[in-house]
Amino acid sequence: MLYERWLKVVQDRRNEVALRDLASGRCWTFAQLNREAETPLPGNPALVFPQGHSPEFIFAVLRAWRWNAVVCPLESHNQSLTVFPPLAPCCHLKTTPATTGVPRTVAFTAEQLAADAGNIVTTMGLSPDWPNLGVISLAYSYGFSNLVLPLLLHGIPLFLAPSPLPVVLRGAAHAHWDLTLAGVPALWRAWHKAGAILSNVRLAISAGAPLPLKLELDVFEKHGVKIHNFYGSTECGGIAYDGTATPRSDEASVGLPLNNVKVAVNRDRALLVRSRAVGETYWPEPEDTLGRGHFQTCDLAEIKDGEVHLRGRTGDHINVAGRKVSPSIIEQALREHEAVAECLVFGVPSGDADRIDLIVACVTADPSSTTEELKQFLLQKLPSWQVPREWWFVKSLEANVHGKGSRAHWQRHFLEIRAKRGAAA
């Protein structure tokens, strides 16, 4: 089904530019790209693992479609994955990020992949006249659904940049007179600080992690570019999108559900997603949270006037003397301080049976800022019991390729350092 859809795209756009590699200067029309798909896969494998950020990734996907192999994109740092192909009609495996635990694989049918791409293209208004500038990982669910599938199923040209560095982005300014740029918050912040946001970006998208409202406002004010917040999940593809022309008024809002996507919250306030794009199953071990067109996320949410507002994640809540607070509430308030570049908040055992947890703020901030200054800032916005007791200033929160900083990773790191200090004392 996917290869047949591709052939229809080739028929309609045969001699138009489909793929351009900005690193080498090479480009392929849709007809030339199709000829790459005719090369048989060595050894006739049942499972193909496209990797890297180059035209070879696209060739590998097309060849897998042509020769009926299952596609399982891998990040460059994941050299191998021990998994066997899912049963038909599943033809694709996605790997979940490891920021919330052990990575898992999710099996998809061709119809589910096509549904996700269709929802994204129609909701965001992706257009062949505004080629995608590819800087995010093609293997990541966000990159595959926003860059690879729109190219192969909808004829949206893809221009691959060799890296997301600001200097590279500036060099891509002349690739086309109108561009669509999908990034993550860490990239948008870096581009903004370097003054590298291009004037010919017609559609700016951010996903992978919460987009700070201050960053959205600053970019809009300085560059006149509205960053559209996009929220999705590996298991079900795109969920919600902020399609407004001006910045949001509420940082917790991730916009309206995508076309053909329905959302609700259960009695525990976890967000439920229903659409034709929802994956078939976790593979090889199914769970009842995913399947039959439904997915129960780990995100706590509220739906107001049709918009999805995220309120933290199940299991992330910090228990302070019997009162629970979501780390995202504290992070949202802390990001409003002009000196704070990024932050993560988590709870650790306090050693006090009455208090239960201790709130820790892990912060990347201007060196001139002080713990007391940030504490006083938060006291103006939050109840005193929600203000962190422990402050940990770091140079970088080391966001991964998806734009996510792992709360669990930094929590473990903090506990390791605390244990060493305790042993030394």
Image (cartoon, helix red, strand yellow):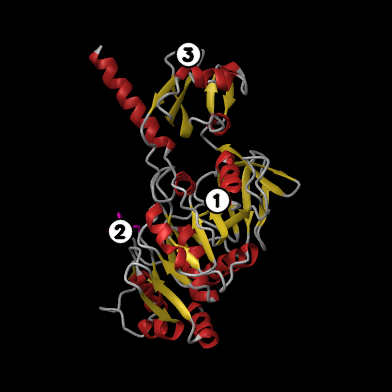
Magenta part of the chain:
75-82
Question: At 50% across and 66% down in the image, what residue appears?
Answer: 132
Q: Which mark is residue 289?
A: 1
Which amino acid type is marked by label 2?
A: Thr
Measure how far apart labels 1 and 3 are at the Cα level.
34 Å
Give the residue pinned by disc 3. Answer: 353
Give the quarter of the image for residue 213. Answer: top right
Question: From the image, which quarter does the C terminus lie in?
Answer: top left
Question: At 46% across and 77% down in the image, what residue appears?
Answer: 18
Q: Give the SS element for disc 2.
A: loop
Q: Give the SS element for disc 3.
A: loop
Measure how far apart labels 2 and 3 are at the Cα level.
43 Å
Residue 343, image x and y in percent? 47, 33
Give the residue pinned by disc 2. Answer: 82
From what the image shows, is residue 244 above or below residue 328?
below
Q: Rate crowding at label 1 as few (under 14), some (14 to 19) or many (20 or more) other CA atoms within 10 Å.
A: some
Which amino acid type is marked by label 3?
A: Ala
